[in-house]
Image: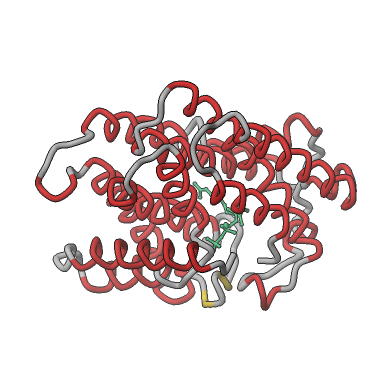
């Protein structure tokens, strides 16, 4: 995903993240350093790109979507920091660097995650540059993001994931865990962009289907990459799912069937876009990227 328009979107997201952190100089120094360490370590920035591409696909302004794009990256990074903790996945490499707790200690890593999650909601609710335009859309975004990343979304999915480690899991349960743990955040990134861009009901409906399918496809291909991927390219350890006896799509349906299933989901996401009138080129490219990524 190196195409210049995505590079440009990514630069805008990095600038927005820096702007947000620069305004929080009163955060205790080590905590701010720890929050910035994980967020600014890179990553593909898929969720912010989806927020922006979705807003622009319905004719919205990038400036209206940027704070939420940055906020989604902060929430995503908080889940990674907490997931890497010894009490969860106990990982020591993330985004090509030592994990947050390895660098700052467990207490600071927990607090950095908490700080990022709460800061994200402050940012999403903030009126842009002194005006109160779009207040209804922002309230709706705060509401759906809170639902998607909370106990009936990402947090709940993580709980089920932890509970099912080392146990036999059927496909239905696996899909539920994957949808909650990873899918909802990707899906809500798309929906948030649509709302901030002023989507009508039909566009919101199409983009919701696109986001749902893409969210599950992302996790299916993530399972595939944990089998086939290269640790150096991915900036994290691979093979952990098998070591931890985690239920994954390749474990349940085999590698090739998993890829086919992931591709069918991506096709479904692309089909949903075909009902839209606006320019969906970037959303299409992002969906294809999910199926072809190597990191
Ligand atoms: C701790 C509440 C809580 C939730 C954790 C997202 C998650 C739930 C755990 C992360 C574990 C993991 C590696 C899941 C696989 C899917 C995933 C989220 C991969 C990382 O996302 P990428 O590939 O990472 O978008 P980058 O670094 O590119 O942003």
How many tags in the picture?
0
Residue 251 lies, in percent from the top left, at 85, 48
Q: Quadrant location of the C terminus?
A: bottom right
Is residue 233 shown above or below 19?
Answer: below
Instruction: Farthest residue to the top: give it.
Output: 201
- The residue nearer to you, when weighing 85 against 35, is 35
In the current view of this chain or complex, which residue is farthest to the left? 130
Residue 110: quadrant of the picture: bottom left
Please name the residue shown 76% across and 44% down the image. 262
Residue shown at 73% from the left, 40% from the top: 267
Give the x, y percent position of residue 168. 82, 39
- Residue 191 in picture, x, y percent from top left: 46, 35
| Residue 284 seen | yes
Occupied quadrant, residue 104: bottom left
Q: Nearest the camera: 69 or 12?
A: 12
Question: 201 or 248, which lies in front?
Answer: 201
Q: Is residue 148 above or below residue 282?
A: above
């Amino acid at each position: 995903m190196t195409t210049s328009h995505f590079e440009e979107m990514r630069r805008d997201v990095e600038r927005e993240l820096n702007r947000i952190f620069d305004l929080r100089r009163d955060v205790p120094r080590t905590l701010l350093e720890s929050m910035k360490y994980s967020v600014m370590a890179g990553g593909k920035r898929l969720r912010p790109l989806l927020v922006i591409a979705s807003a622009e696909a319905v004719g919205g302004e990038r400036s209206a979507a940027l704070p939420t794009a940055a906020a989604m990256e902060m929430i995503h990074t908080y889940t990674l920091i907490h997931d890497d903790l010894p009490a969860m996945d106990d990982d020591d490499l993330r985004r090509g660097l030592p994990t947050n707790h390895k660098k700052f200690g467990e207490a600071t890593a927990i607090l950095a995650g908490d700080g990022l999650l709460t800061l994200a909601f402050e940012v999403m609710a903030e009126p842009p540059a002194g005006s109160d335009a779009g207040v209804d859309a922002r309230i709706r975004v705060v509401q759906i993001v809170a639902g998607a990343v909370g106990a009936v979304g990402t947090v709940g999915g993580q709980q089920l994931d932890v509970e099912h480690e080392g146990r036999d899991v059927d496909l239905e349960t696996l899909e539920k865990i994957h949808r909650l743990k990873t899918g909802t955040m990707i899906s809500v990134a798309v929906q948030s962009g649509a709302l901030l861009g002023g989507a009508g009901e039909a566009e919101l409906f199409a983009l919701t289907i696109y986001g749902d399918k893409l969210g599950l496809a992302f996790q299916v291909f993530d399972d595939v990459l944990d089998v086939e991927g290269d640790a150096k390219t991915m900036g994290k350890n691979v093979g952990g799912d098998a070591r931890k006896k985690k239920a994954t799509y390749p474990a349940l349906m085999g590698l090739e069937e998993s890829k086919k299933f992931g591709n069918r989901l991506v096709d479904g996401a692309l089909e949903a876009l075909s009902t839209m009138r606006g320019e969906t080129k970037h959303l299409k490219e992002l969906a294809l990227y999910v199926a072809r990524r190597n990191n």
